[in-house]
Image (cartoon, grey):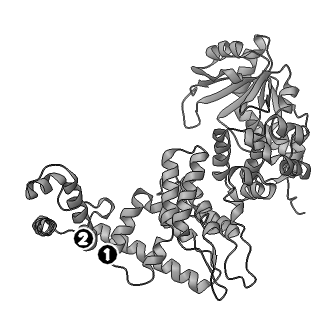
């Protein structure tokens, strides 16, 4: 008998029972604390969904009838530490340190939120929070039915008013209430649909998808910080492609990342250039496949690498030119793309270092192909390493991922060429400090030899010696001094 593609709800219940039993001691005890004080408590959202998927969670989310002040008092007694940073939204957090010894012992982290509803003022970018009075009402404001399931505590009663378990078994994403109302209350939920498509690999239910298409412009009222947080979670999911396709196909990307759908260039009748959008998704997939484990050079998930892989060609649409004879060119698209990336990521409020690193990778992603045109000098290899700096390992992976040709010979030739470059880098590393190249003389020595004080001339001399170091490798103090003196005399002539 063949195994069904999707597990039945009964199978999921059996699976969840096993996971919840492991979670239960701390959760049930917390439920008893709230019940003794006359309040309801239920495990909600992600931990419940994940239990049905066979995944445990050390971070537990609860909903309660207690007010934030009452919750804070109860958690202070239950846990070893607590915090109220989310109190204005009704959320209090707490940590209980591991009880007992052994590898299985772990801290328990909980967040407890007062039953609530929230909605947007049409003129505001922030949701208006209002506390509710029932668990069902609280679950109705959740983004998706698969996240609108709960387990009442301490008696472990399963609550599923919107058939989330059925949708979980069918691998479908659907809103608990009419999608138009749900998205109108909080437009960010549309992005969360795309994010969960990436995280869970589920399909979007047709009515939910249609509502997103109609209401995508409503995202304009959501703050850039909230949008960026969702995009980050989407890109760091196991399969970002699925979520990105939802963004593009529904029009959400036009609102938050318009450079992505712009990659869907019309393919000319002779197919002389690639579908840049599909190429970019493939590059992203291939870059993800090259991420490493926690102890490797590029631990997964690497947000910088993934952003660079997705956006490396966004400079192509504005630089596309149709050449005589039917050819197509994208001259300097890497330079244009780097500027576009920096502008978009800044608008989305990404951290400054992330913006800088992604833009630099986009700018450098074609550099290897220039070196591949002829014999590589040691100077060229040094400049490649120096220009990449701490991004070198990511650049290695981005460059390899950027090869999506179906021509096996060409693909092998490019891969072999890049392997050769990596070997050249390794060989130079053994001979010299290629990762931190400095001139043979420092600023103090330059001033001493030339008999000058600090100023622009020292910087110019430093750059000259650095260029010589790049070109010829280590010069040694004697030769560097002679080169510096000759340069200075020519400059003064």
Q: Quadrant of residue 136?
A: top right
> Residue at left 57%, top 28%?
98
- Give coordinates of residue 344: x percent, y percent: 60, 52
Disc 1 crowd, CA 10 A, few/some/many (<14, 14-19, 20+) = some
In this rendered view, identify the residue nearer to me: 154 or 426.
Answer: 426
> Residue at left 75%, top 48%?
196
The C terminus sits in image quarter: bottom left
The N terminus sits in image quarter: bottom right
The CA span between labels 2 and 1 is: 8 Å
In this view of the protein, can residue 470 be seen by the observer? Answer: yes
* CB contact under 8 Å: marks 2 and 1: yes
- Of labels 2 and 1, earlier in sequence is 1
Q: Is residue 477 above or below residue 16?
A: below
In this rendered view, identify the residue nearer to me: 101 or 407.
Answer: 407
Q: Is residue 171 above or below residue 157?
A: below
- Give coordinates of residue 435: x percent, y percent: 33, 61
Residue that sits furthest to the front in the current view? 493
User: Circle 2 sits on which residue?
Assistant: 473
SS at circle 2: loop
- Give coordinates of residue 217: x percent, y percent: 79, 46
Residue that sits furthest to the bottom in the current view? 325
Left or right? Give the position of 233 relative to 154: left
SS at circle 1: helix
> Residue at left 90%, top 45%?
166
Q: Is residue 136 above or below residue 277?
A: above
> Residue at left 57%, top 52%?
343
Left or right? Give the position of 423 relative to 113: left
In this view of the protein, can residue 302 be seen by the observer? Answer: no
User: Circle 1 sits on which residue?
Assistant: 378
């Amino acid at each position: 008998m063949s195994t069904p593609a999707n597990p039945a709800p009964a199978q999921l219940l059996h699976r969840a029972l096993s996971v919840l039993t492991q979670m239960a001691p701390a959760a049930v005890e917390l439920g008893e604390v709230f019940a003794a004080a006359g309040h309801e408590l239920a495990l909600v959202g992600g931990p419940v969904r994940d239990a049905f998927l066979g995944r445990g969670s050390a971070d537990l989310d609860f909903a309660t009838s207690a007010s934030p002040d009452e919750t804070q008092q109860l958690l202070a007694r239950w846990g070893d530490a607590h915090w109220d940073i989310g109190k204005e939204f009704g959320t209090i957090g707490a940590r209980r340190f591991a009880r007992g010894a052994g590898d299985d012992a772990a801290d328990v982290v909980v967040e407890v939120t007062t039953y609530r509803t929230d909605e947007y003022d049409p003129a505001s970018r922030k949701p208006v929070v209002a506390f509710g009075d029932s668990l069902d009402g609280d679950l109705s404001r959740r983004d998706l039915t698969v996240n609108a399931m709960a387990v009442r505590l301490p008696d472990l009663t399963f609550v599923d008013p919107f058939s989330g378990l059925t949708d979980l078994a069918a691998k479908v994403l659907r809103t608990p209430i009419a999608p138009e109302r749900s998205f109108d209350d909080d437009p960010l939920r549309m992005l969360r649909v795309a994010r969960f498509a990436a995280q869970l690999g589920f399909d979007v239910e047709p009515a939910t998808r249609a509502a997103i298409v109609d209401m995508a412009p409503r995202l304009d009222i959501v703050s850039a910080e909230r949008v960026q947080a969702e995009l980050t979670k989407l890109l760091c999911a196991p399969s970002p492609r699925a979520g990105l396709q939802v963004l593009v196909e529904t029009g959400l990307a036009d609102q938050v990342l318009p450079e992505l759908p712009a990659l869907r260039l019309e393919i000319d009748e002779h197919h002389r250039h690639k579908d840049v959008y599909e190429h970019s998704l493939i590059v992203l997939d291939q870059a993800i496949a090259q991420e490493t484990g926690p102890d490797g050079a590029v631990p997964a998930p690497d947000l910088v690498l993934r952003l660079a892989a997705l956006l490396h060609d966004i400079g192509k649409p504005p630089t596309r030119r149709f050449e005589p004879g039917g050819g197509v060119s994208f001259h300097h698209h890497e330079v244009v793309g780097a500027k576009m990336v920096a502008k978009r990521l800044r608008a989305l409020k990404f951290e400054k270092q992330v913006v800088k690193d992604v833009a630099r990778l986009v700018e450098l992603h074609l550099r290897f192909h220039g070196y591949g045109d002829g014999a590589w000098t040691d100077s060229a290899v040094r400049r490649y390493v120096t220009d990449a700096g701490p991004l070198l390992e990511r650049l290695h992976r981005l460059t390899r991922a950027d090869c999506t040709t179906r021509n096996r010979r060409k693909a092998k030739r490019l891969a072999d060429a890049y392997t050769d470059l990596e070997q050249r880098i390794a060989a130079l590393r053994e001979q010299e400090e290629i990762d931190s190249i400095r001139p043979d003389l420092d600023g103090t020595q330059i001033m001493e030899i030339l008999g000058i004080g600090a100023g622009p001339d020292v910087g110019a001399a430093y750059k000259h010696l650095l260029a010589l170091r790049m070109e010829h490798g280590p010069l040694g103090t004697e030769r560097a001094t002679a080169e510096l003196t000759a340069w200075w005399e020519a400059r003064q002539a």
